[in-house]
Structures are given as structure tokens and as C-alpha cells.
Amino acid sequence: MTYEHVIFDLDGTLIDSAQITGSIIDQMLAERGARASADRGMIKAMDAIGGEAMIAAVMGQYTSDPAADIKEFRKRHRSIAVTEDVLFPGVAEALAELRDKGASLAICSNKPQFLCEKILGDLEILRHFTVIIGSTPERARKPDPAKARLALHGLCAAPEATLFCGDSIIDIATARAAALDVCLVSWGYGTAHAMPFHPEIPVLHTMAELGDLVHANQGSDPLPWRCDPG
């Protein structure tokens, strides 16, 4: 089996977003008199949930209004530059190779749309993606398949020609609800939790392995399926 398109989760799959999240929450905690830093393990565990629930769990007694604090968090996030070390090893090279060999790529994330676009732009990998589907007020969060279907539409992609690459049970549920094959990355925040429940799913140990999975070691010719994106 070969795939013409790849849809990626973002946090914990392509980027180590806990670095950014932890740094911003550390600032917020310090301004409120906390001596402890944000628990990076908790940030990773709460990543797939995100939003107010993540802020409430990580900030604990130092938040009385998680809704206001997630707005403050996102405001700070908007103003800081995202540095290259946030990318997991081999990501930039693998994305470039996939594009060079004819694959089209998309992002399907629960992170707010504007942050997806900012992060990918700061990391200079935005150009690799035909479609970026993040969260907006009117979009249901994963594992609802609506975002994955929006990505498929934007890619002009048939589900059977598309692979979903993620790191969590939520990504698995999203992919399957959208009739997509799925793989996980071994370094993902939620992969260790997901693997015992889904041992049949391929797990990438390096980003270089993704090209072999996409093209099934049979060369780089894309599948012939096409549609009119209009």
C-alpha cells in the first residue's frame, strides 16, 4: 500500500510543544508567587485535552479562573518566537523529502488555528503543508472526525490514499472515524498509553521511517487518484 497524502497531528508528533507550554506557564506561576515550575509530565499528559482543563491541572491553586488564564496563556504564546529545537529530530528533513517525492501534507490539530500557523511559520516548515486545520470556535475537537474530513477536502484526498500520523488514542479514534489508516510516533506524548490498546498500529521510531511507510518501499510515484478541489 502506498499513500499520496499524509495528515499530521502537531503537538507531541512534530513538535515538543511542552517546552513552550512549560516556559509560558512558568512565567505565569512566578508572577503569582509560586516557587515550583510547571510539571512537564503533566503538560504532556494533558496535551490532548488542552485548553482550560490543562491550565487548571498544571497551575493548580494558582489559577482561580482557567478560562481567563488560557486566554492569557495564548496571548503570551502569540508574542514569543518558537525556536528550531522544538521540532523533534528529523521532522524538517522528512517533511521536505515527502513533498519532494510527491506527497501532499496537512495538519489536523486541536491547537488554536492561529497558533498552528504561527508555530509552523516560525519553524519555517509552513510551506510544506497544503492545508492546516486547527481549532476555531465552530470546529469540533478531535476525536470528532470533522477536522480530518476538512483536511481531506483541502488536500482533495481520498481516505484510502491518506495516512494519519499522530501520537495518541485521540488521533487513532479521529483517523478511524474518518476511515483513514493511522500510524504513531514512538516519542509521542500519548503513544506509550495508546500502544497496549492498539498493538496492530505501526509505530515510527524515527521520522526517516515515515517515507518507507508512505511509499511501502516501492518507490515514490504517487497514487493516480485525483479530484477537483473546487
Image (spheres, helix red, strand yellow):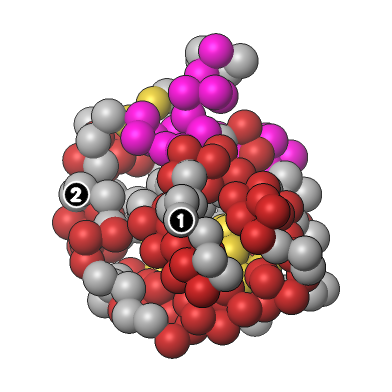
Nearer to us in this view, 28 or 206: 28
Q: Can you tell which quarter of the image residue 185 is in?
A: top left
Tag 1 secondary structure: loop
Quadrant for the N terminus, please: top left
Task: Mark yes or no: residue 202 visible.
Answer: yes
**In this picture, is 182 found above or below 220?**
above
Residue 212 visible (yes or no): no
Q: Residues within 10 Å of mark 1 (few under 14, many from 20)?
A: few
What's drawn in magenta, residue-wise?
171-196
Residue 200: image location, x then y, percent: 51, 15
Horizontal relation, residue 178 to residue 46: left or right: right
The three-letter code of the residue at mark 2 reads: Gly
The residue at which mark 1 appears reads as 35
Residue 90 image label: 2
Image side of residue 84 versus residue 191, left or right: left
- Kindly report the distance in space between the C-alpha atoms of the residues bearing marks 1 and 2: 36 Å
Left or right for 104, reference 206? right
Magenta stretch: includes residue 64: no
Query: For this rendering, which residue is in front, 113 or 22?
Result: 22
Identify the secondary structure beneath mark 2.
loop
Q: Which residue is drawn at 60% across and 44% down?
A: 46
Badge number at residue 146: none
- Please name whichever residue, 67 or 226, is drawn nearer the observer in this view of the structure: 67
Position in image of residue 169 (x %, y %): 62, 32
Residue 194 magenta-drawn? Answer: yes
Front position among marks 1 and 2: 1
Q: How crowded is mark 2: few (under 14 residues within 10 Å), some or many (20 or more)?
A: few
Name the residue at 55% across, 13% down.
196
For the point 54% across and 41% down, the residue is: 42
Seen in the picture, residue 27 relative to 159 is either above or below; the reply is below
Upstream in the sequence, badge 1 or badge 2? 1
Give how far across and how far down residue 116 sits, in percent: 50, 71
